[in-house]
Amino acid sequence: MPETLQDSLKKEVGVEAARLIQSDMIVGLGTGSTVRYLVDELGRRCHEEDLHFTGVTTSRRTAIQAQSYGIPIVNINDVDHIDITIDGADQCDKHFDGIKGGGAALLWEKIVAVNSDYYVWIVDQSKMCDTIGAFPLPVEVIPFGSQHVISYFEHQGYEPVLRRDALGNVIHTDENNVIVDLHLHHIDDPQALSEDLIHTVGVVEHGLFLNMVDKVIIGSKNGPTVLLNPYK
Ligand code: 5RP
């Protein structure tokens, strides 16, 4: 898909999802290029439609963008609930299992998601698939001993790659951990993989978000379509 079309579909779903937000809500704001469009639209609504809400963000990047529009951002520890969270995703299958963490924010994203009353993904149509795994699965790992975790992943046949930036520097998350991307190609048993990963000492969290999302808004050339998760 040409990048310009993908960008326009990301904007389409970002704008559409912004309609879900009402004044006085506590709103979880995800991370990534799709969410950037969401936050832009929410910023516009705050200025032009007198929308006012409180945000909890899943990354420092999103906090900076939201605050640039004057949207108040609070620490997740200072709210007793989150009404709704809207985030992007890297892949989603028909069982509403997905992969997240392409933007290295999966840990905060999962913490915000599990503490949200309602959880929405905004994706362009290229993210929808039959079987997840073509997108490398991000795993957040504590730096201490991370080489041993990577060796274990190699032994398991997970094809791990330590994530680096364009200059070759190891990327660190907002919690100062590293990301190891697993090149699995297809994940036939996400639940079993999740169990293995989360029980590996040194792993903080992984990017498998299994049956967590309530609603997926998918951008396509014919306009956004909505999938409601019947399994939750
Ligand atoms: C960040 C994420 C993003 O939501 C995911 O990578 C999708 O990003 P984009 O909207 O840029 O395609 O999980 O950790």
Image (cartoon, grey):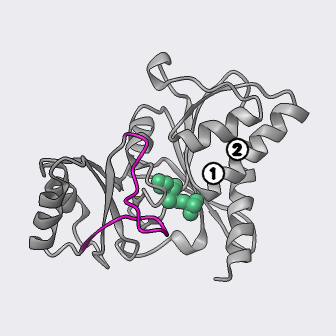
Label 1 element class: helix
Q: Is residue 141 in view from this perspective?
A: yes
Give coordinates of residue 216: x percent, y percent. 55, 56
Give coordinates of residue 96: x percent, y percent. 41, 59
Q: Is residue 228 in view from this perspective?
A: no
Residue found at the very far right of the displayed protein: 48
Residue 64 horizontal side relative to residue 139, left or right = right
Read off the magenta span: 160-175
Of residues 211 and 68, which is closer to you in this image? 68
Q: Distance from label 2 to label 1 (Cα)?
A: 6 Å
Residue at the (39%, 37%) spot, across then down: 111
Specify the label residue 201 is tagged with: none
What type is the residue that disc 1 sits on? Val
* Residue at which label 1 appears: 35
Give coordinates of residue 188: x percent, y percent. 24, 73
Within 8 Å of ligand 1, the CB of disc 1? yes
Residue found at the very far bottom of the displayed protein: 1
Q: Residues within 10 Å of mark 1 (few under 14, many from 20)?
A: many
Of residues 52 and 128, which is closer to you in this image? 52
Give coordinates of residue 213: x percent, y percent. 45, 49
Magenta highlight on residue 55: no
User: In the image, is residue 129 above or below residue 20?
Assistant: below
Label 2 element class: helix
Quadrant of the drawing holding the N terminus? bottom right
* Residue at which label 2 appears: 39
Residue at the (43%, 57%) spot, across then down: 100
Residue at the (69%, 57%) spot, across then down: 13
Of residues 112 and 219, which is closer to you in this image? 112
User: In the image, is residue 191 above or below residue 26?
Assistant: below
Residue at the (30%, 75%) spot, across then down: 183
Within 8 Å of ligand 1, the CB of disc 2? no
